[in-house]
Image (spheres, rainbow, N blue to C red):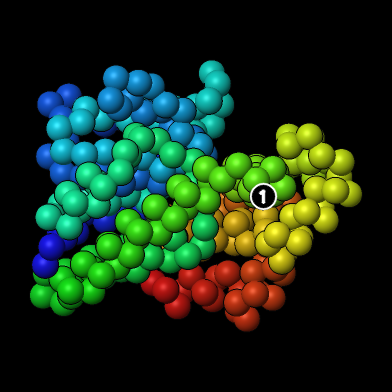
Amino acid sequence: METELLICGYSYHAEPFYTNFKNGLSNYLFRLQVEGSSEVYARGRHYRMRGGDLLILKPGDEYDLRIEPAEPGGRVASGDYYLFCQGAWIDAWWNCSPRPAVSRIGTDERLLALWRNLLLEKRRGPREESAELSDCLLRALCLYVDRAMTETSRTDRTFFAALRLKRYIEEHATSTFKLEEAAQSVGLSLSRAVHLFKSCYGLTMIQYAIEIRLDAALERMKYSSMSLDQIAETCGFASYSYFHRVFRKKYGVSPARYRNSES
């Protein structure tokens, strides 16, 4: 295979966390912040990572990650997908165009699906993992990253306003926010923002926020030991009963039953 997936996982931190590669990375690192925030030092710069920010680094790059409360006394919350990889194909992909350390690409469900499939394949272990399948999925993820970067660099004003609305929702979905605040963040009236978002993405802003909240809930149900009440609260649902209702409507089972089936 021309690529090798070394490590792939999902991390959620509710407590302070630190890591440092002072001597530089040995392999390529991809890290997608999907919720909360973190502080990263890479290539001589400090970055504040928020939901939708992608970090990609090459072998030899220094890397320092700090996850702390955004303000003194505040709560810690950071969720991300990450992977380490290497290979001739990755080398060629990296060198085909400039690669900024941090890019804002959003948390598109298709990109996350590729990452989750890589994670699940890696979890099979050496005896069951398909190196060929991992190779294909990793290449697809790299190419999808290229597409996401191209889309976010477009200068069409209407498209860019809709994209900024989408990014705002992705960043604030797991906390409480008002539609008026989302509209104000891009300089639009509420009615214009609502119409623009629906015409571009086929969902209302509230529907999209609920999709993000449910995705976050699924990740915590699978990969954390948080209670369902805690998951509902930290994913932006006003109450557990509301979380239960929208979860059951989408997946056909209660959160408790879903979690038990995954264990």
Q: Is residue 226 visible?
A: no
Residue drawn at 34 percent across, 34 percent down: 101
Residue drawn at 85 percent across, 48 percent down: 192
Asked whether, in this view, residue 109 is left or right of residue 28, the answer is right
- The relative height of residue 232 versus residue 45 in the rendered view (above or below) is below
Q: Residues within 10 Å of mark 1 (few under 14, many from 20)?
A: some
Asked whether, in this view, residue 241 is left or right of residue 128, the answer is right
Q: Nearer the viewer, residue 259 or 82?
A: 82
Asked whether, in this view, residue 108 is left or right of residue 197, the answer is left
Split into 4 quadrants, where in the image is the N terminus? bottom left
Q: What amino acid is found at the position of numbered circle 1 in the picture?
A: Phe
Residue drawn at 72 percent across, 47 percent down: 158
| Local secondary structure at mark 1 | helix
Q: Position of residue 170 (x, y in %)?
A: 60, 48
Instruction: Determine which quarter of the picture holds residue 44.
Output: top left
Q: Nearer the viewer, residue 192 or 114?
A: 192
Split into 4 quadrants, where in the image is the C terminus? bottom left
Q: Position of residue 147 (x, y in %)?
A: 44, 55
Mark 1 sits on what residue? Answer: 159
Q: Position of residue 144 (x, y in %)?
A: 40, 59
Asked whether, in this view, residue 230 is left or right of residue 22, the answer is right
Q: Is residue 99 visible?
A: yes
Q: Position of residue 224 (x, y in %)?
A: 42, 55
Instruction: Determine which quarter of the picture holds residue 15.
Output: top left
| Number of dots carrying numbers | 1
Residue drawn at 52 percent across, 74 percent down: 258
Q: Nearer the viewer, residue 170 or 95?
A: 95
